[in-house]
Amino acid sequence: MQIHWPLIVSTTCQRVGLGLFICAFLGFVCVGSPVGLSVVAWITLVLLAVGGVASVFHLQRPKRFFNAFKNPKSHLTQEAIVTPFLGAALLACGLDGVLYDLGEASLLAGAVAAALAAAFLVCTGLAYQMGSRPAWNTPFVLVLFLLTALSAGTIGVVVLWLVSVGLVPVVFVWAAVASTAVCVACQIAYVARMRSVGYGVNVEATKEPYRPYFIAWVVMGAAVPLTMLLSLFIIPLAPVISCVIAWLSCACGIAAWTMLFFRGAHKVKMFPMYPVDLNLDM
Amino acid sequence: MSDKRYGMVIDLDKCTGCQACAVACKMENDVDLGVFWERVYRMGPIGEFPDKLEMFYFPNQCMHCENPSCIDVCPTKATYQTDEGVVLVDASLCFGCQYCIWACPYEARTLNPHTKIVEKCILCVHRLEKGEQPLCAYTCTTGCRVAGDLGDPESQVSQVLAQNEDRAYRVHPEFGNKPSVVYLLPRKGAETLCKSIGR
Amino acid sequence: MGSVIPLPDGGKLVKTNCFECHAKCGVLCEVNKDGELVSVKGNPEDPRSEGRLCSKGLSAKKILYDPERLRWPLRRKGERGAGDWERITWDEALDWLEGRIRAITDEHGAEAIAFGQGTGRGTNQWTARMGNAGGRVHHSLAPGNICLVPMMVQSIVQLGCFPIFDGCDFDHADCIVFWGANSVWTEATYSSGQIGRSRDRGAKLIVIDPFFEHPLAAKADHFLGVRPGADTYVAMAWLNVIISEDLYDHEFTRKHTNAPMLLIDGPDVPLNGQLIDPEGNPQSMLVFDRASGQLVDTHVKGVDEDMEYRGMVTLADGSEVPVKTVWAALKDLVAEWTPERASEMSWVPADVIRESARTYANAPAATINVFQGVEEQTNCRDTIQLILMIIAICGNLEKKGGNLSMPFWNQMFALSGPSPETAVELRMVDERAPGYLNGSGNTNMIFNAMLTDEPYPVRGYIMVQGNPLSWSEDTKFVRRALMSLDLLVCMDYYMSPTCELADLVLPSTHWTERDYLADEVCSEWVFAQQKAVEPLYERKSDVWFFRTLGHRLNPEWWPWETDEELFDWQLEQTHAGITWDALKEQWIHHLPMMPSRHFEENGFATPSGRAELYCVAELAVGAGPFPKASEPKESPYATPEVAKEYPLIGVTGRRYPVYYHSAYRGIPHLREIVPEPQVMFHTSVARELGVEYGEWVWIESPTGRITMKARPTDGVDPRVCVIPHGWWQGCAAIGAEAYPDDMCNVNVITGARTYNDEFMTPGLRSTLCRIVKKEGGE
C-alpha cells in the first residue's frame, strides 16, 4: 500500500499529544506534576489540531468533512464523535487555573480528557485493523497504536519534569524506558509477523522497498530514545537535551513506523496459491 | 427486505479475456478514464512450455457481498446496500477517505481522480430493474456471465449456478463476506487454484 | 417492425452492423432526437452474434466523435510528407484527382496506377473493379497475399468453396480446432459464444498455435505448441495417424473426394478420358468401378469406387501404364510422417500429435478454423491444402458441426468485373514468388517498380482504408517507394503514417455514418448496414468514392448514379434475391446456400466434381497437385546460417482484442487497456539477456530493427518470440506516446527475403530475429 502522508502526520501527532496527556495525567495522580495539567492540555490540543488539519488533507472532498459523523458503526465516525468531546475536555483542562479554577474538579476533568484520549486512540487503532490486509489483520495494530502513544507519552513526561524543574523522579525515567522497550518489543513482534502473514503478501521489512522505513524506525523509534533515556543514568551531563532528543526521536520513530505500517499493508492476493500475481498484460 | 438477491455468475471456463465487458461498463456507465469498475485480469501463463502451463482470465468487479467489508468502515454512509443486495456508493456523501478501498478484499473500488469520489460496479441495477442483463453480461462475447436474482431458484442465474455447483467458487470465503458474484472454476488451466481449494 | 424504431423521446433505434472488424455484428444504434449517436449495443436478432458485441464495436460512439478523425479532403501543399495541407472541397479533390490520373495514364499507361486497400471488409470487389476498369492490370496493392487470398483461393480451387472462415459450425461441432487462428478475439461473433455452448455440451477443443497465451490454449483438450511455420509436419502426421489408424470417413472419402481418382504412377498425373480413348474428354478424370470393372468419370454417381486400385491401363496409343489411386499416392506421401518424425520438426510431442489427431477424427462432427498463423507463412499453401484434406477425409465438409461453404466467397468475384487480358503479361512476379495461384502481382515488386520503374513505371497509388506502412513487409523500403510516387491518395479515418506521405487525403465515413451492404464474413446472411447518423463534416463512404471516381473515369464500368443503385446491382449479381430498399426495411436477409451443401446430388465445384485431395487445378497452373511437408523458406532448418545470427523465430502480427490492426490506439479508453507495445519471449531468454519486464529492448532481423518493451512469459517456446503490429498512433488524452519513424513498427524487421510460391506470402509469422538488450542511453 502506498504511504498516505496526511495520515502519517495526523496519527503521529495524535499519538504523541494524546500519549503525553494520558501519561502526564497518570503521573499527576500518582506522583504529582511539576507543571499544571493545563499546560499539558494546551500542548496536546496543539498537536491534536495539527493532526486534525492533516487528516482533513487526506480527505479528497474536505468540504464534506462533516459527513464523517454519519455511521456510528465506523471507527472513523466513532473517532470523529469522540473528537469534539475530547477537544472540549482538553480545553476545560487548559483553561483551568487560567480563566477559572476547578479545584477538586480538575482531577475529574483530567480523568475525562484522559479517558477520551484513550478512546480516541482505540478508535484509530481499530480503524486500521482490516481483514483485507493481512499485515493489519491483528490486534497488534490496536496494541501498537496504544503502546506508541504510551512510549511517547512517558518520554514526554520526563521532558516536562526536566524542562520545568531540572529534575525527574527516577520512576518516570524507568517508566519511559520500560514503555519504550515494550513498544519496541511489540513492534519487533509485528515486523516478525509480517514475514508470514500469508495470502501472498509476506513482507521482509529489512528488504527493499521497506528497508528505509525499517532503518528509520530502528534508529529513531528504538535506538535513539532508549540510548538517550539510559544515558541519563550514565552520563547525566545534559539531561534536558538528551530527553528532548529522545522525545523528538520517538515522535519521528512513530512516523517512520507508520510509514512501514502502511507500506507493508498489502491487500490479500486474489489467488495467493500462485507465486505470481494477476496481470493486465494482453 | 426484499426476497430478491441480485448476483452474478461468471464462468471462468468460458472467459477469453476479450475486455468487451470492461469497455461495455465504461460506455454504459460513462466511467471516467483512469477508472475501471470492471476489467479482466489474467493469471499466468505460468509453468513450463508447452504442457505444464496454467492460465486463466479473471474478470474482476464488485462482488456485491452479502456482508460487505466496505459498508461498516465508511464513516459517511456513502456506501450502502440495497434491499436486493446490491452495494452502491452515494456520490453525494462520499468524501474520499478511501477506507472502503482499503477494506475491500477484492480490489473492487477505485478513487476517481477526477471527481475525487470512490466508485465501483453498480451491477447495472438500472438495467436489472428493467429485466435486462448488466451490459457486461449482455455484451460478453463468450456468454460467460449471467446476472439476476439469486434468491429465486427459478431465475436463470440460479439455474446456471445449480447446474454448475461443483465448479462454483466464491473468492476468499474465509472472510465471510459472502460474495454475490460467484465464479465457476475453469475446467482446465487452473490446476493450482483447484487443488488448493480441494477441487 | 422496420429496421428503424422510433423512441418515445423523439430519438430512434437503428438496426445496422458494426464494421470494426470483418465479423460485422448486428447492432442497435441509439440516436437521440438531435441526431447524435448515444450508444451502440449488440442486436440479439443477429443469429450469429445474438447481441454479443466486442470492445471495438461498443466504442463506436467514441470513434465516430473522435476529434482526431479526418474531416475534410486535404491536398498536399509543401514537400511530400512535410505535413503542410490545404483544405479543399470534394469537387476540387475529384477534379484534381481525375486530372492527375489522366495525366499519368496518358504518359505511362493505365498500369501505372495501382489501386489498393487495407482490410476491405466489403470493398474487395470495388477496389478490384476500380483496378480492372483501368483495362490493363489490377495490381491489387493490398495485403491479400497475407490475408484471405491463400486460404480462400486454395479452398476454392481444392473444394470449390471456402469453409474454414465463417463456415466453421462451432455451434454443432463435437470437436473444435483453432489452427493458427484466434477468432475468439478477432471475430468473436461467430465463434466465442458458440464455442462456450459447445464446450458445455462436451465438445473437445484443440489449439495449434506457438503461443500459449492464445485465449483458448489453456482450456484446450490438446494444445499443440507448434514451431511457427512447422504446421505442415503436424498436418502430415495427423493424416498419417488418421489413415494408418483407419479413422477417416470411408463413405465420404470414397464417394465425395477424389481419393479413388486414378493417376499414372510415376508422373502422378491424372489418367484422363482422352488418354484411354481418342474420342474421350481430356477434362474427364477417372475412377475404377468395382461393380462394372470399368473406368468411369469422377462425376458419375452410383459407382462402386475402388480406393485401393493399382494396375496397368492400356492407353489409346497402345502403351501400357501403371496406375494408382490418389488415395494410394496420399498414403505413400504421409507414410514417413509418423508423429515421432513430425515431432522432431514441429517441436510438438508425438503423443500430443497422435492424441489430438484421434480426438479430431473420432469426433462425430469436427470443425477446423484456420487463419493467419498458417496463412502468413512461406509454406502456407501446403499447410492449407493439408488441412483441407484432413477436413475432407474425415467427412467434415459441408456437414453440420463441420466446415460449411458460405456463398459470399464464391459470389464476390462477379462484382470485380473480368480481369483485363493484359493482366497476365503485366503481372509482376519473379523467381522468389511465381505466384501461381495469386491473380495479382507481388506487392514488393510493385513497390519496387515505384522506385525503379522496373519492369515498368508505377507512378500512382490510390487506396481506401490502407496503410501499407503498417501492413507491408519491409517498411523502410515501402516508405522510400511511396516517397518516389507522383500520386498517392489515401482515404482513411485518421491521418495515418501513409496518409502523411500522400498528395490527397480523403475523409472516410465511420460505419455509423454511411450506408453499406454487410455480406463479407456474414456467413448465411446479408445485412443492410445502414447509417445511424448523417455523415459528419465532409466525410464520404469508400463505396461512394470508388463509385464517383469510377463514374468519372470509366462510366461503362461504373454506371451507377447513386450508392443505392450500386447496392441493387450488387445484390442482383450475388443472387441475394432482394433489393436494397427491401433489405433496408428488414435489415437481415437469408441467402440461398451453395449447391455443395447437397453434395450427394451436386458434387463439389472442382474439376473432378469432388473435394480434391489431389488438386487438379494446381497441376494445371504449374503448382504441385499434392502438398509437401515443406519447411518455411526462412527457419532454423532452412537457413541455419541466418538462424545463427538471429536465433529466435518471431511471430509477428498477434492481435489484440481491443484494436483492429493499427487502428484505435488513439481511442483513450481502449489505449488504457493496452497502453504499450510489448514483445513477448521466454523468461529464460530474459534471464540470459539480463532483461527485466518493461525494459525497452531492440528486436533485430536481417532487414532492420525496432524497439518494444520486454514482456517475458512462460507461455512460449524459448526459441520463439511474439511481436505485435500496428503501433504508431499516440493518445494525448491519456498521455500515451506515439511511436514515430517506425520505431515500433514490426514490419521494419519482416523482410522481402522469402515468399511463398503460390501466394507470394512473406513469412511474417516466422521471421528470424533476435532480442538485444539496450545499452545505456540507447
Image: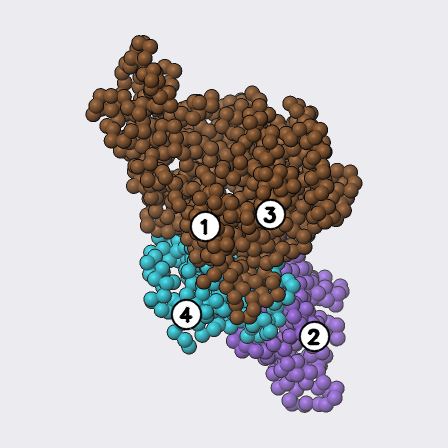
Q: Are marks 2 and 1 in contact (CB under 8 Å)?
A: no
The chain letter for the residue carrying disc 1 is: C
Q: Which residue is mark 2?
A: A49
Question: Chain letter of disc 3?
Answer: C
Mark 4, mark 2: which one is toward the viewer? 4
Chain A rendering hue: purple
Q: As rendered, which of C482 and C364 lies closer to the eye? A: C482
Q: Secondary structure at mark 4?
A: loop
Q: Do residues under tags 3 and 1 come within 8 Å of each other at their CB atoms?
A: no
Q: Which chain is cyan?
A: B
- Figure quadrant of the N terminus of chain C: bottom left
Mark 2 and mark 3 on one chain: no
Q: Which numbered mark, 3 or 4, is in the foreground of this view? A: 3
Q: Nearer the viewer, residue C78 or C239?
A: C78
Indicate which label's residue lies in the foreground, 3 or 1: 3
Identify the amino acid type marked 3. Glu
Report which residue position mark 3 lands on.
Answer: C561
Residue B5: image tag: 4
User: Which tint was used for chain C?
Assistant: brown
User: How far across and how far down the image is residue C756, in percent?
Assistant: 52, 27
